[in-house]
């Protein structure tokens, strides 16, 4: 899984690729590499383990000649650990053909055995290395034909960029499953894993479809099917812009993004609750359809899945509609029981997560309507869904999702309100009250942030614990899962999220004086139940950090530390609880010296299964 950029034109290639590749670092950052053809058609390959800045350093130390064609890659390891050798581009045995690959070649073992028998020598542990060898195997002077034949043999998902010493004026691209776009410039053309990567150079793009091959020269782009039939390209002009996020004085993007949440939610509400009227532009579904929906099915991964879990509580509670939720990776292989009366909600910050895209395709094939709740404008998910509710949280750089999560939560409240209104499961008075409460949330975020130093101290005082439990009930059970995920993602501390009622069925065995337990217990109808769980933890010497409603003095007797949040309606509490959970994870990770914005082994968007 990874990000790809390619260029063919008259300008110097390396700076263009470097600039574009950095915009794809969200897809992986364990190693990167580039291949170029110089004016004598020598194939020049540079690779570096680690982040793209290491490759940049290499170019500074070993400057390249001016080149006019090249391919580049930033990697998130699937097959073979991160190293210079396993980094892309991969090349064939004659050092003639270079390939960058995003995806997984599932039949690589058979292909490797076959190619080894033909005398190919493999140097890496990757699945991808079979591709240049396979193309070379079929190559008889016609690169397009060789690529086409190789594609017939590949099983799995892939987006590819191919260049060859024998064809210095040509760049070939192809895809199945993994996204790839072509950028059309003036006497120059591009390939990239997503649009923002090349927006500084062109706004004219072709979204390559599955099983299509593109042959790029500096002057034109020709499209073909894998069988070689010519396809007329459809060129889109991209209207959105992407601003480059900066830290603006914050030590990390994550803390900047945590601070941004108040204004993100404020802007979202200004757009979506105009004069207390719901504006869900992009939903594209009639009230009649929404009224007759029989079931909602939510698909998502990671943090977006946790937002979906909260969404289930909200939609069921307000819309009185049955909601199922499943991680996309399970949904796609389960043969789910859905039909044209099912509303599928696909939640994704990036809109590029491979499993979520596959789940959406599965749902559409079964006749369901799919609405995406997505942050990245113009992403694959936004294009494939029947309707799109953008969260407009702005670019999120920190790999651990913060503002995108709370924006997803807010979107669930708004969507649930819409469903409840259409289905008449909420009175106009209750609807107005809920809107009033939602409109107050951005200001409440600022209130929580006033306690940031206190939360930092609590985090630091607990940063030595080697294991954390996060417990919550009802609508804050998903908050517990998200709190645990945030902590493990960025601090590498084993952390478990549990429904507090389940503690007695296992996790309680973990509790002793060496564990920290975060108990999410704002005022609610399950307050007393949760308080009992807190006492059970204290009785076993566990260290309790409570998140509670401001003014709750009783909780102090059950906790070692208390973090306050302002009082809100029960159903809205996950919005406020999220903030101290994010801050706890952040300050613990910082105290432990972790790479908060780019934690090891993770990627912002997972574009393979
Ligand atoms: C990765 C990221 C998570 C994210 C998940 C889903 O695992 O590290 O932060 O929640 O992917 O990403 P999506 O873009 O679909 O929300």
Image (tube, grey):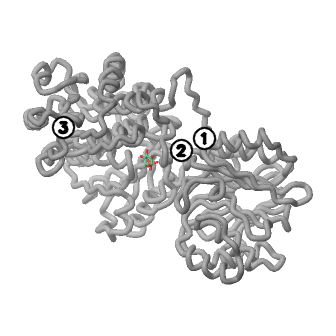
- Quarter of the image where one finds residue 534: top left
Position of 157 relative to 409 (above/below): below
Residue tagged 2: 377
Q: Is residue 554 left or right of residue 439?
A: left
Q: Residue at x 87, y 54 (%)?
A: 38
Q: Are marks 1 and 3 in contact (CB under 8 Å)?
A: no
Residue tagged 1: 240
The nearer-to-camera label among 2 and 3 is 2
Q: Is residue 443 visible?
A: no
Marks 1 and 3, how far apart at CA: 38 Å
Marks 2 and 1, how far apart at CA: 7 Å
Q: Are marks 2 and 1 in contact (CB under 8 Å)?
A: yes
Q: Nearer the viewer, residue 584 or 172?
A: 584
Q: Secondary structure at mark 3?
A: loop
Q: Would you say the beta carbon of the disc 1 residue lies within 8 angstroms of ligand 1?
A: no
Residue tagged 3: 427
* Residue 533 image offset from top left, x and y in percent: 11, 37
Q: Are marks 2 and 3 in contact (CB under 8 Å)?
A: no
- Quarter of the image where one finds residue 213: bottom right
- Quarter of the image where one finds residue 262: top left
């Amino acid at each position: 899984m990874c990000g790809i950029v390619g260029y063919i034109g008259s300008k110097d290639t390396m700076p263009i690729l470097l600039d574009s590749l950095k915009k794809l670092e969200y897809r992986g950052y364990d190693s990167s590499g580039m291949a170029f053809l110089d004016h004598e058609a020598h194939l020049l390959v540079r690779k570096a383990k680690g982040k793209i800045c290491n490759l940049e350093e290499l170019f500074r130390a070993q400057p390249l000649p001016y080149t006019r064609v090249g391919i580049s890659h930033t990697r998130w390891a699937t097959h073979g650990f991160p190293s210079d050798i396993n980094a892309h581009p991969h090349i064939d045995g004659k050092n003639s053909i270079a390939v960058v690959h995003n995806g997984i070649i599932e039949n690589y073992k058979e292909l490797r055995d076959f190619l080894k028998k033909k005398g190919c020598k493999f140097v890496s542990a990757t699945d991808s290395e079979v591709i240049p060898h396979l193309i070379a195997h079929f190559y008889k002077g016609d690169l397009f034909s060789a690529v086409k034949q190789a594609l017939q043999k590949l099983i799995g998902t892939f987006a590819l960029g191919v260049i060859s010493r024998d064809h210095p004026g040509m760049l070939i691209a192809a895809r199945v499953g993994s996204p790839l776009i072509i950028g059309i410039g003036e006497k120059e053309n591009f390939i990239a894993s997503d649009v923002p990567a090349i927006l500084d150079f062109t706004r004219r793009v072709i979204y390559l479809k599955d099983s299509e091959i593109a042959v790029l020269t500096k002057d034109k782009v020709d499209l073909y099917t894998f069988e070689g039939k010519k396809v007329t390209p459809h060129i889109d002009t991209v209207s959105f812009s992407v601003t480059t996020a900066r830290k603006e004085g914050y030590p990390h993007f994550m803390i900047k993004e945590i601070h941004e949440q108040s204004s993100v939610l404020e802007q979202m509400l200004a757009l979506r609750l105009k004069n207390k009227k719901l504006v869900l532009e992009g939903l594209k579904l009639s009230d009649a359809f929404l009224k007759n929906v029989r079931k909602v099915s939510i698909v998502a991964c990671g943090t977006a899945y946790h937002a979906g879990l909260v969404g289930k509580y909200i939609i069921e509670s307000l819309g009185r509609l049955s909601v199922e939720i499943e991680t996309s990776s399970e949904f796609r292989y389960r043969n789910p029981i859905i039909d044209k009366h099912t509303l599928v909600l696909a939640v994704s910050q990036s809109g590029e997560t491979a499993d979520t895209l596959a789940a959406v395709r599965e749902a559409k094939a079964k006749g369901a309507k799919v609405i995406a709740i997505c942050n990245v404008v113009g992403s694959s998910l936004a294009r494939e869904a029947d309707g799109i509710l953008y969260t407009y949280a702005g670019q999120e750089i920190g790999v651990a999702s913060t503002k995108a999560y709370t924006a997803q939560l807010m979107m669930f409240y708004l969507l649930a309100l819409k469903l409840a209104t259409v289905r008449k499961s909420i009175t106009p008075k209750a609807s107005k009250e809920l809107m009033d409460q939602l409109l107050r949330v951005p200001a409440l975020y600022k209130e929580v942030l006033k306690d940031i130093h206190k939360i930092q101290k609590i985090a630091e005082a607990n940063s030595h614990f080697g294991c954390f439990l996060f417990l919550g009930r009802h609508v804050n059970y998903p908050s517990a899962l998200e709190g645990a995920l945030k902590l493990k993602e960025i601090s590498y501390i084993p952390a478990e999220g549990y429904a507090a009622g389940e503690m007695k069925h296992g996790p309680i065995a973990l509790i002793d004086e060496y564990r920290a337990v975060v108990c999410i217990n704002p005022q609610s109808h399950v307050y007393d139940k949760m308080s009992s769980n807190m006492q059970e933890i204290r009785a076993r010497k566990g260290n309790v950090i409570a998140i509670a409603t401001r003014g709750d003095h009783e909780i102090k007797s059950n906790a070692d530390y208390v973090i306050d949040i302002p009082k809100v309606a029960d159903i809205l509490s996950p919005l406020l609880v999220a903030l101290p959970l994010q801050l706890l994870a952040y300050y613990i990770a910082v105290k432990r010296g972790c790479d908060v914005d780019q934690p090891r082994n993770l990627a912002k968007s997972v574009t393979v299964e």
